[in-house]
Amino acid sequence: MALKMADYKTDVHNDWCPGCGDFGIVNAIQMALAEMGLERDKTAIFSGIGCSGKTSHYINTYGVHTPHGRVLTFAQGAKIANPEMTVVAVGGDGDGLGIGAGHFVAAGRRNVNMTYIIFDNGVYGLTKGQASPTLKLGEQTKSLPSPNTNYNVNPIGLAVASGFTFVARGYSYDVRHLKDLIVQAVNHKGLSFLDVLQPCPTYNDLNTRDWYAGTDLMDEAQKRHSRIYKLEEHGYDPVVHYNEESEINEKLTQSLIKSLEWGNKIPTGVFYKNEIITPYTVRLRDKIPNYLENPPAKQNIAKNGFSNTDITQILDSLEV
Amino acid sequence: MSSVDFTWLIGGPQGSGVESGANIFSRVCAEMGYQVFGKREFYSNIKGEHSYFTVRIADKKIHSNVNDVTLMASFDAETIFRHYEEVIPGGGIIYDADLEDTTTDKVHTLDAPFKERLHKELESKNKPFSIAGVLEIAKEKGVLLYPVSFKSILEALAEETENPRLKGLIRMFNVIGVSLSLGLVNMPPDSLQKTIGTIFSKKKEIAKINQQTANYSYNYATAKFENFNHTLIGTQKEPGTLLVQGFQGTALGKMACGCRIQPYYPITPASDESVFLESNEILEIIDDRPGSTAVIQTEDEICAMGMTIGSALTGTRSATCTSGPGFALMTEMLGWAGINEVPVVITNYQRSGPSTGLPTRHGQDDLLFSVFAGHGDFPKIVYASGDVEESFYDTGNIFNYADVFQVPVIHLMDKFIASSVVTCKRFDQSKISINRGKLLDKVEDGYERFAFTDDGISPRSRLGMDNGIFWDTGDESDEKGHITEDPILRVKMMDKRMSRLDLILKEIPDTEKAVSFGVADYTIISWGSAKGPILDAIEMLKKEGISIGFIQLKLLHPFPGDYVSSLLKDAKTIIDVEANHSAQMGKIFKQNVNREIDYSILKYTGRAMTSTEVYDSLKKIVENKADKREVLMHGA
């Protein structure tokens, strides 16, 4: 029987603040899982620390809520050991781009076939609103004693530069669009990254839902001009179609340029997609021919309670 | 027949083939039936600094190095400056005659503190600050000198084989040194030719040049060198003898016991183990398709630990391998593995700390750190192996502990073991039993990962298993694995996890907790690689009619206090031997056994203990002449 969105929900009480952008993201994930009909016990959500870290408890699949900044390390380990699983990692921008920035970059280089979603709200919510890596220099959200003294990380640009092969941005209040992006990200062959703009109604009083909706940008006819727009509606082609340097460079460059757009016009949608670069699991298969059929998690390691690994040959080579 | 106990030392600049020279020598001796105990010392450097190898050869089982060197083969000046004192009267020094006039100020890698000590010594004996000076001292002591121009050997050889390329091949100096040495001790030459053939079996041309060089040098020594009284002509070979490098015990243990993933970050002296695993990544499986070990080089030790845990959640036997500085980074996640009851194995090849410390030198520095690693209370096991042979079987056992008790296990190894090359009995893989504890193959409905059970251990599902859905969290959790802050549930969960420490002490057999080599009035307690020097020192004292007991502790956390206490009940004086500054094990011992340590024998120069110096200290203790805290200093 086909699974419905409700099947992917747990009965765990959700304690996010009313109006939190995280709700949209968790709904979009559940909708995407239902649309893809992914088996619950072949799917695992890994999460980091912070409000977004609780996501794994709200989704009725395997859920692994990991230490701060380390979600990608756990998720990659599980995926490499059991490549049959669908693995989605989630976390805040502080988690992934602050304390976890080193893992973010290294994960890009590895290109393990899985998805990473960052809940990007510019603040550390659970610790009462300190500036997080995506908050702009000089901005002062409401609980900051003084304006932010750090320049911001560009998540899309960093992902592209690090080697992520699918890089996209969604908006937590456009749940359908976000769901579509998640489906594309999960179906992508390689490491996919989704930067999700997610207003924190409690601590980020700058990048609010109204701000994204452009209520401050009314024209004379009292018409709003949403800051968010969709790349795909403007003829933007993110895909690297063939394996040539000029093609790759063009698509990389255009995504980097697009990633710098901010202010009155903020692009969402897919910035970059490259399936020519091999995923890590394929690279492992090139070294270990039966890796995909007989990955670490599937290997039988014992016979009648004793080792079934035959190390005779190695021992012979060491024998004198 | 008089017994053989011979130590050969080869030294030279790092990168000049000291290690391969030592490998050839060790292998020849092992092939000829001798027991071998070799140990490599090197700087944190790629090329140029002094590195040396001491290979002890005997016709009975040996477990350590001694202070005395019987024969030294050097092809640079620094080796002579640093080691001439170690060569015994009647021993020999083979050296490059072209170096005699070299003065200490010409050897840039001689560091200031060493040079100062050397100059003082030479001054006091009225000798010039040169190779000639130190060799005079050696000669006066009764050391036989064997000067030979390495360059002229190459020149003569080039002529003889009509291969002018050989003339400039200083890379051959190591083979010359080895072959001169073997010629001097009359080792049958066939074994040398055969060994070189085996080592270079994939490079026929190189094998040939090496064999020619070996042959020429060997004959040179037998023809020109005289008066050396030590011979190594071979002895009865024990069937089923391996010549292994120290890190291969845990690596082979991991392969045999089904460890199928090892994420790691490069660090000395641990990486050799991971590289060896990767070099043998495809595994033969009895009656099944090939298996494999996925060895993943990560961006740091944090990721290595995260990946290891992530992988373990899929039911895969998972390990990582590191040294102290890397383990420091891993501790962040150790508590996560603890609270989520994840079986993982961390092999820690310890080195001298703190911080980067002496990065390529030995130390048993991380015991207290391992026992207390991680914030908060959670169960874990800290286990130490005493030598390479033990480490193979111990690796099999600790993966079982990890699975059965669902805890992280820290396996303490060290640099001394990692960079030793020894003969030992062939590992018997049929003794590696596999016990996966409550790991499930099938899950019934209503599964709860952290369900309360009689023994405090819950059945374990694996990521990706039908019906087995669970949640993990670093927060306190309920039976399903969802976050809870309920005070009552918190206490129940905490008690459930921590009850495992008692269970571990109850379930692990006594023979795996500690090994008694006999108890006497004077009894040593120790752990890890100090075992070897202790066993040999005890043997030396036994010949003098002095009996010393020895308890080797293996399970160090949870500490088997009652068992150790019972073992020691007939001991009157307790001597703690370990390679660190603060007698770390002694501290844990005192916490858990209601007894005082009477003496400590400690070493923290960064060099492994020799049995000679352990013997010396033990003797002082027995003669009531020792300090409460004996500090060992031998070794360059």
Image (tube, coloured by chain):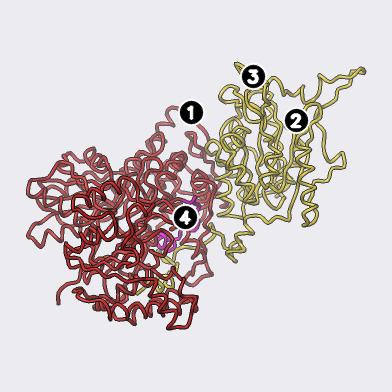
Chain colours: A yellow, B red
CB-based contact (under 8 Å), mark 4 and mark 2 = no
Name which quarter of the figure residue A171 lies in. Answer: top right
Task: Measure the alpha-carbon separation of dots 3 and 1.
Answer: 35 Å
Mark toward the viewer: 3 or 1: 3
Q: Is residue B262 magenta?
A: yes
Task: Measure the alpha-carbon separation of dots 4 and 1.
Answer: 31 Å
Q: B621 or B83: which is nearer to us?
A: B83
Task: Say what amino acid the circle numbered 2 marks.
Answer: Tyr
Protein chain holding label 3 = A
Q: Residue at x 73, y 23 (%)?
A: A208
- SS category of the residue bearing label 3: loop
Instruction: Indicate left or right for B162 with A131 as reference.
Output: left
Mark toward the viewer: 4 or 1: 4
Task: Say what amino acid the circle numbered 3 marks.
Answer: Pro
Start and end of the magenta stretch?
B250-266
In the depicted structure, whether residue A310 falls above or below residue B604: below
- SS category of the residue bearing label 1: loop
Within-10-Å neighbours for mark 3: few <14, some 14–19, many 20+: some
Are marks 3 and 2 in one subunit?
yes
Query: Mark number for residue B485?
Result: 1
- Provide residue A12's location: percent of width, then percent of height: 58, 33
- Provide residue B356's location: percent of width, then percent of height: 41, 43
